Amino acid sequence: MSKSPFDPVRQNVNLSAKITSGLERIASVFRVLLWEHAKTIGLSPIQIQLMIFVSYHDDGLCNVSHLAKEFNLTKPTISDALKVLMEKGLIKKVHSEVDKRAFTVALTTEGRAVVEETAIFASPVEASINNLGKAEKEQLFITLKELIFRLNSLGIISVQRTCFGCHYYEKKADGHYCRFIDKRLLDAELRLDCPDYIEKSMA
């Protein structure tokens, strides 16, 4: 029997293979939705993703080095994408006051308008999830965050800002606790992309 999770015969006897195949189908939905938006405005999917990321994240994460790590791409690839966006007047460089060679990127007024139009590309997926019951959504979220954390631990996902890998997170007998906000957290309150995240020291 094939070892591929995409082999229907193996899926019939292996639930993990079936789930893996299902996740790949969902991933393909995101690709299709993103391409549809990209075609209408003359940008590539990665250019749209970069702009959306820059729009919703702290300036310290919006430099070439971090963006390359975030999207698992090379620095030259990110630099080329940013160059096109600058030429189109959608982003601008913000130079460091300490080191003029260093810079972050920020959206222009035109760039913010594009993000407002394209950041909703995944709305059909969100709408489908909204049709699930509260308990189903909470269990799906728990499963996703644990999967993301495990893939990050294996080095497959290079960046994650989830509670499990955060300096402020504590696992207690009665659940989860965040020392940053000094509060016990329910499963549904755990975050996948926290702006206050500080990577936990492995020392």
Image (cartoon, rainbow, N blue to C red):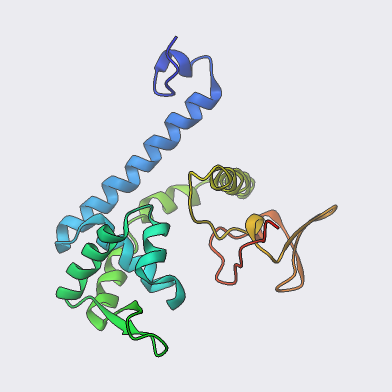
Q: Quadrant of residue 146?
A: top right
The one nearer the camera, 155 or 146, is: 155
Q: Position of residue 112 (x, y in %)?
A: 29, 77
38 left or right, relative to 73: left
Q: In the rendered image, is residue 104 in sight?
A: yes
131 left or right, relative to 134: left
Q: Residue at x 23, y 63 (%)?
A: 81
Q: Quadrant of the N terminus?
A: top left
Q: In the rendered image, is residue 58 in sight?
A: no
- The single residue placed furthest to the bottom in the displayed view is 97
Q: Position of residue 101 (x, y in %)?
A: 32, 81
- The single residue placed furthest to the right in the displayed view is 173
Q: Quadrant of residue 67?
A: bottom left
Number of callouts in the render?
Answer: 0
22 left or right, relative to 89: right
Q: Position of residue 77 (x, y in %)?
A: 26, 58
Q: Is residue 82 above or below residue 24?
A: below
- The single residue placed furthest to the top in the displayed view is 1
Q: Residue at x 67, y 61 (%)?
A: 201
Q: Residue at x 56, y 45 (%)?
A: 144
Q: Position of residue 24 (x, y in %)?
A: 40, 36
Q: Quadrant of the C terminus?
A: bottom right
